[in-house]
Amino acid sequence: MENTPTSHIEERIRAALPEVAIERVQVLAHGDDPGVEPGQTAVRVLLGRAGRPEGPEADKEILTAYTDAAGRHAALKQLSDELPFIAWIEFLPYLQDESTRHGGPLGRGPVSRFSIRGGGMMNAPAARVEERIRSAFPEGTVERVQVLAHGDDPEVGPGQTAVRIFLSRAGRPEGPEADKEILMAARDGVPGSRLGEVVNELPFIEWIEFRPHTEDETAAHVGPSGEGPSIRISPREQSQAPRPGEPQEQLTPVMTRLGAADLTAVDTLIAAGIAGSRAELLRWAVGRIREHPAYAQIQDRVHEISELKAQF
């Protein structure tokens, strides 16, 4: 926290957002919240309800009113300059009893989170991302949008944001064949869709996954939400593709599954700055193995075994 007193951080937050009805400010260190990595400091701002009742709809109204306010981004940019060590600032509607927060414990319900470290707004608030995603499709195409951060889904790494789009069935019954038709239509491009244009506005999105909407996600074919039939695209990989004429390293996608202990080890190394993502960390680990002197000996043995097999 660079030895900055908590009271000073709260004072600067309130001063930067004078027109915002702030009920409470929480300054979080590692161990206070699962989303705060070792050595990080984060801030959670609980917004006043301004007479609105507690409930999902009112919570969404509060966050929308906050994110749509003029000058909001400029105020956050000012905070990033004054408090550069803050990793992220999260805005939540205030609740008398946090255990009743919709969607889960504190930090889970409707939320807008801004990544401050490095300057500017790296992650748009979830409500804004959902709004932009919905605007990319004709009305009635999208049933539901989930904006996922690290901790919301095992496949979302530290510092990443992903989107899961549930497509309307448009009168189709639930079942494997209908699901396949919906996904093929999404793959081939929904008529009138502006997804490519919107994706360019949201370059920080790690991946976007399309799934047919089901009334009961636990009964989705093949498994729970996130495991049924789906199509996934990676805007970030597309945006980082080399231009024509540039040298290109041939990379092969490899799917792997890690247990809880291994995943924690990977995320810890990312937090330590060894790599920027899980994929990058695994490439780094394989590279370290390849540099080990014993690897060359293993290569020789494998070559000898292959030659012996060829003699049979």
Image (cartoon, rainbow, N blue to C red):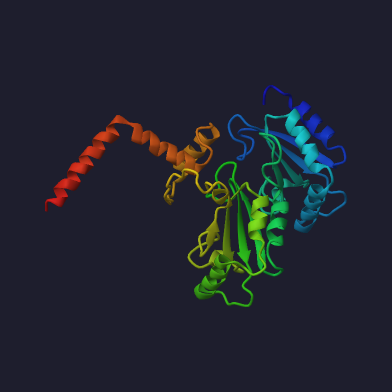
Q: Residue 124: where, in percent of width, then height?
A: 70, 47
Q: Residue 40: where, in percent of width, then height?
A: 63, 31
Residue 249 lies in quadrant: top left
Q: Quadrant of the N terminus?
A: top right
Residue 37 lies in quadrant: top right
Q: Residue at x 39, y 36 (%)?
A: 287
Which of 116 and 54 lies nearest the eye of the viewer?
116
Q: Residue at x 82, y 51 (%)?
A: 65
Residue 271 located left or right of residue 2 = left
Residue 173's place in the image compared with 309, above or below, is below
Q: Residue 215: where, in percent of width, then height?
A: 62, 69
The answer to whether residue 24 is visible is no
- Number of numbered callouts drawn: 0
Which of 89 and 283 lies nearest the eye of the viewer?
283
| Residue at far front of view | 245
Q: Residue at x 72, y 23 (%)?
A: 4
Q: Residue 19: where, in percent of width, then height?
A: 88, 40
Which of 16 and 32 lies nearest the eye of the viewer?
16
Residue 232's place in the image compared with 283, above or below, is below
Residue 254 located left or right of residue 209 = left
The answer to whether residue 133 is visible is yes
| Residue at far top of view | 3
Residue 252's place in the image compared with 19, above or below, is below
Residue 126 located left or right of residue 54 = left
